[in-house]
Image (tube, rainbow, N blue to C red):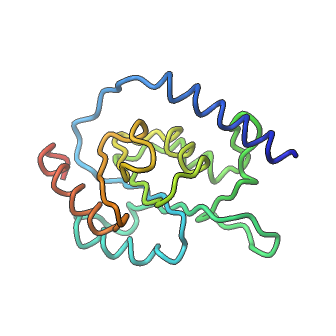
Amino acid sequence: MISTLKSKSIQKEYDKLIAKQSDKKHKTTKVKKVAILLDNEALVNVVLANLANNFPLKKEEVTVLVYREYSKKDEPSPQFFTDKDFGFKASLKSDNLKNFVKNEYDLLINYTKTSNLLTNMVTLLSQADFKAGFAEIDDRLYDIVVSDVNFNEAVLNQELKKYLTILNKI
């Protein structure tokens, strides 16, 4: 019962924020700090390796945040967030999540393959200058949208590199 009410309040807040979202001015600086949002912790190393091949980034400049289902057995980690890190009206409970959203990244890449209200909310709240992700999730969240029916991370990185080069961001 509570989770349904909480989910509805987060959805309502999401709809309100997405409607308010206006066109923002992007910085003209090169991409140096990158945030990655995932929904599968097994993909972390694959995504980081693929990103390193496509972009001239240092490992310290990349921050990864992974969504996973809440389990009492899992220990809290700064790399993960769960539905327990959100309160009513999309309030952020964990300091880790608050810091991720507050940090100013040059680029946020959302590699999630299924539409998830919580990962979408993190993407929406993020202070990243550029946001990129798959088209099938929610086009309104991103500045750069890549359509790939297989949700292949390599394709997203390849297309992202092409467009960021055109925009003189890398």
* Of the pair 121 and 29, the residue shown nearer to us: 121
- Please give the count of numbered marks on the rendered protein: 0
Considering every residue shown, the one lying at the far right of the view is 1
Give me the residue at 59% from left, 34% from top.
14
User: Residue 130 at what x, y percent from top left?
Assistant: 34, 42
Residue 10 location, quadrant: top right
Task: Classify 116 as above or below 156.
Answer: above
Give me the residue at 38% from left, 71% from top.
47
* Of the pair 152 and 71, the residue shown nearer to us: 152
User: Residue 126 at what x, y percent from top left?
Assistant: 49, 41
Q: Is residue 139 left or right of residue 53?
A: right
Task: Classify 109 as above or below 122.
Answer: below
Task: Classify 118 as above or below 47.
Answer: above
* Of the pair 77 and 18, the residue shown nearer to us: 18
Give me the residue at 37% from left, 69% from top.
59
Q: Is residue 121 left or right of residue 53?
A: right
User: Residue 111 at what x, y percent from top left?
Assistant: 43, 60
Residue 28 location, quadrant: top left
Q: Is residue 130 left or right of residue 137?
A: left
Task: Classify 97 as above or below 75.
Answer: above
User: Residue 147 at what x, y percent from top left?
Assistant: 30, 53
* Of the pair 94 and 160, the residue shown nearer to us: 160
